[in-house]
Image (spheres, grey):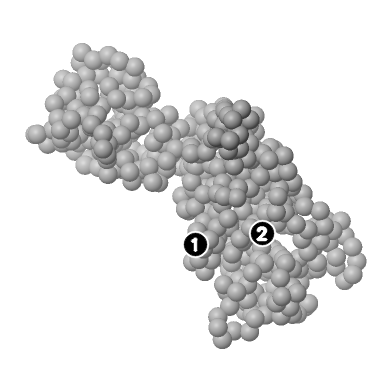
C-alpha cells in the first residue's frame, strides 16, 4: 500500500529497469536486510541487493537465516569480484542476488554505480559529529548516489528513537543544479512477503531523486557479480544447461540427513544439526537456462575479456596459445571446465579471485604434503624434464590450462607430446612474452 496526501494507492512507486536487474543498496543493513529483501521479492522483478556493514549478518553464519520450515532460504554462490559473499534464492523464478560485504559504508558506496533504490534505516554512518541529525542533511549527501528517477526508501524502524531523522520538507528540495529530491509518500508493507525468521512489517517514507549527473554503465558493475556476464555468447551457449554448484563448505542434504538420523538414534551423543535443511542447488536448471538465454539475446549486458589466440595440433592434441595473463581469463576457463595447472603462488592468487574456476585443478605444490611434481623447476634450461607431460597427467578434466614453461618453444612441445596419449583433448597455454612458442 502507498499513501500520498492521505490517499491510498495499491501500487508502490518502485522504479523499473529494462534489460537488467534493479540495483539496490542497503548500507549499515544489519539483520534488517531481510526487510529490503522482502520488499524486492514482493515486487517480482529481477534485482541485486548489496548490503554493506562493518559486521555483516551473513545468512550462512550462526544463528543462520532459515524459513519457517527450518529450511535454507539463501543459498551461497561463488564470491563476486566486488568482494563479500553472494547468495540467491532458487525458488524465485526471476534473477535475484544478495551480497554482503564487511566494509565501512562510506567506502563501500564509492564502489557502487548510481543505484535504482537506496534503502536506509540507520543514518549515523553518514552524519559527521558537527552535522544536524536530520534526513535532509543526510539526503543532501546520499542523493548523488541514486540514478535519475530512482528512489530512496527511508525505513521508519527507528522513528521513535530518533524522530529528527523524519523531520523533512515534503516539497521538492533542490540540492544543486543537477540534483533534487522530492517526497512521494508513505510506503506500507504490513505483511512480510517472505516467510523468514526475523522479517517484520515495514513502513517507510519514499523519495524520488532527480539526478542529471553522468552515470557509468550499470552493466559494467553487474559484470563483476556473475562470471556468466563476462563470457562471450558462444561460451554462454556451452554452459546454458550447467548451472554452477553451491559454494562448498556447508552440508548438503545427504550430510544433513545423516547427522539428523544420528541425532535421532543417539541423541545423547549427537546434536541435532544447527544448520537449516539445505537446498539442492543455487539455480533450478530451467531458470538458469532461461536466464542465460536472456543474456544471449541482450549482448549489450556482456563484458567478455578479449583474447589473442593461436591454434596448432600435435599428435591429435589441440593446443591453443593465448597471449595474456591466465589471471584475466578465469571466467572463460570456468566455462570450459578446464583443469588449471600452475605453481602455488599463482594458484592461490587465482583461487582468491575466482574459487569456482579452481575446483577441478590440482595443487601441484602442497603445504605439508608431498608435491605432485617433486623438485619442480618451471622454466629455463634447468626446467623439470618432460614438464608438459607431467602437467597433462595431473589434469582432472579433458581441457588443461597452464602458463608458459620449459624453454617456451613449440619444438619442445612436439618432442614431449609426439608419443603421448591420455584423457586430455585440449591444452591451453598462456604466455606473456610474445616470442614464446613462436618456433
Quarter of the C terminus within the rendering:
top left
Q: Residue 336: which quarter of the image? A: top left
Image point (27%, 22%), residue name: 393
Quarter of the N terminus within the rendering:
bottom right
Left or right: residue 6 versus residue 356 is right
Cα separation, mark 2 vs mark 1, equals 17 Å
Numbered disc 1: secondary structure: loop
Q: Earlier in the sequence, mark 2 or mark 1?
A: 2
Is 38 located above or below residue 340 in the figure?
below
Left or right: residue 236 versus residue 17 is left
* Other-residue count near label 1 (Cα within 10 Å), few / some / many at <14 / 14–19 / ≥20: some
Find residue 382 and report its horizontal and vertical position in percent: 9, 34
Image point (19%, 38%), residue name: 435
Left or right: residue 395 versus residue 171 is left
Residue behind mark 2: 32
Image point (58%, 78%), residue name: 127
Is 416 located above or below residue 47 in the figure?
above
The foreground one among 279 and 406 is 279
Residue behind mark 1: 103
Left or right: residue 207 versus residue 311 is right
Image point (66%, 59%), residue name: 32
Find residue 434 and report its horizontal and vertical position in percent: 22, 40
Find residue 373 and report its horizontal and vertical position in percent: 21, 29
Amino acid at each position: 500500500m502507498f499513501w500520498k496526501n492521505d490517499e491510498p494507492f495499491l501500487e508502490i512507486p518502485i522504479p523499473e529497469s529494462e534489460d537488467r536487474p534493479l540495483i539496490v543498496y542497503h548500507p549499515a543493513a544489519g539483520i534488517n536486510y531481510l526487510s529490503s529483501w522482502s520488499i524486492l521479492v514482493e515486487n517480482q522483478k529481477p534485482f541485486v541487493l548489496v548490503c554493506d556493514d562493518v559486521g555483516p549478518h551473513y545468512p550462512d553464519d550462526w544463528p543462520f537465516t532459515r524459513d519457517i520450515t527450518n529450511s535454507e532460504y539463501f543459498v551461497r554462490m561463488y564470491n563476486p569480484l566486488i568482494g563479500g559473499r553472494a547468495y540467491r534464492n532458487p525458488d524465485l523464478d526471476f534473477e535475484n542476488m544478495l551480497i554482503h560485504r564487511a566494509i565501512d559504508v562510506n567506502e563501500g558506496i564509492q564502489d557502487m554505480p548510481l543505484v535504482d533504490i537506496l534503502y536506509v534505516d540507520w543514518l549515523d554512518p553518514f552524519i559527521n559529529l558537527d552535522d544536524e541529525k536530520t534526513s535532509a542533511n543526510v539526503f543532501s549527501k546520499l542523493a548523488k548516489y541514486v540514478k535519475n528517477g530512482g528512489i530512496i526508501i527511508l525505513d521508519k524502524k527507528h522513528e521513535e528513537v530518533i524522530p529528527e531523522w523524519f523531520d523533512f520538507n515534503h516539497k521538492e528540495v533542490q540540492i544543486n543544479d543537477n540534483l533534487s529530491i522530492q517526497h512521494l509518500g508513505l510506503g506500507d508493507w504490513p505483511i512480510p512477503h517472505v516467510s523468514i525468521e526475523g522479517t517484520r512489517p515495514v513502513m517507510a517514507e519514499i523519495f524520488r531523486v532527480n539526478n542529471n549527473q553522468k552515470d557509468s554503465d550499470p552493466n559494467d558493475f553487474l559484470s563483476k557479480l556473475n562470471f556468466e556476464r563476462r563470457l562471450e555468447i558462444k561460451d554462454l551457449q556451452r554452459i546454458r544447461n550447467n548451472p554452477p554448484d553451491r559454494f562448498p563448505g556447508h552440508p548438503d542434504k545427504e550430510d544433513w540427513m545423516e547427522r539428523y538420523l544420528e541425532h535421532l538414534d543417539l541423541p545423547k551423543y549427537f546434536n541435532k544439526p544447527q544448520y537449516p535443511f539445505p537446498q539442492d542447488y543455487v539455480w533450478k536448471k530451467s531458470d538458469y537456462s532461461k536466464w542465460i538465454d536472456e543474456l544471449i539475446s541482450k549482448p549489450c549486458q556482456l563484458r567478455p575479456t578479449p583474447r589473442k589466440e593461436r591454434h596448432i595440433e600435435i599428435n591429435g592434441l589441440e593446443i591453443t596459445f593465448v597471449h595474456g595473463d591466465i589471471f584475466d581469463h578465469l571466467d572463460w576457463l570456468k566455462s570450459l571446465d578446464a583443469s588449471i595447472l600452475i605453481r602455488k603462488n599463482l594458484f592461490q592468487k587465482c583461487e582468491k579471485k575466482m574459487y569456482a574456476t579452481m575446483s577441478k585443478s590440482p595443487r601441484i605444490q602442497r603445504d605439508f604434503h608431498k608435491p605432485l611434481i617433486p623438485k619442480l623447476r618451471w622454466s629455463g634450461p634447468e626446467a623439470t624434464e618432460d614438464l608438459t607431460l607431467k602437467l597433462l597427467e595431473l589434469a582432472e578434466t579433458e581441457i588443461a590450462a597452464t602458463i608458459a614453461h620449459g624453454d617456451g618453444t613449440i619444438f619442445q612441445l612436439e618432442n614431449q607430446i609426439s608419443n603421448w596419449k591420455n584423457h586430455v583433448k585440449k591444452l591451453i597455454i598462456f604466455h606473456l612474452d610474445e616470442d614464446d612458442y613462436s618456433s
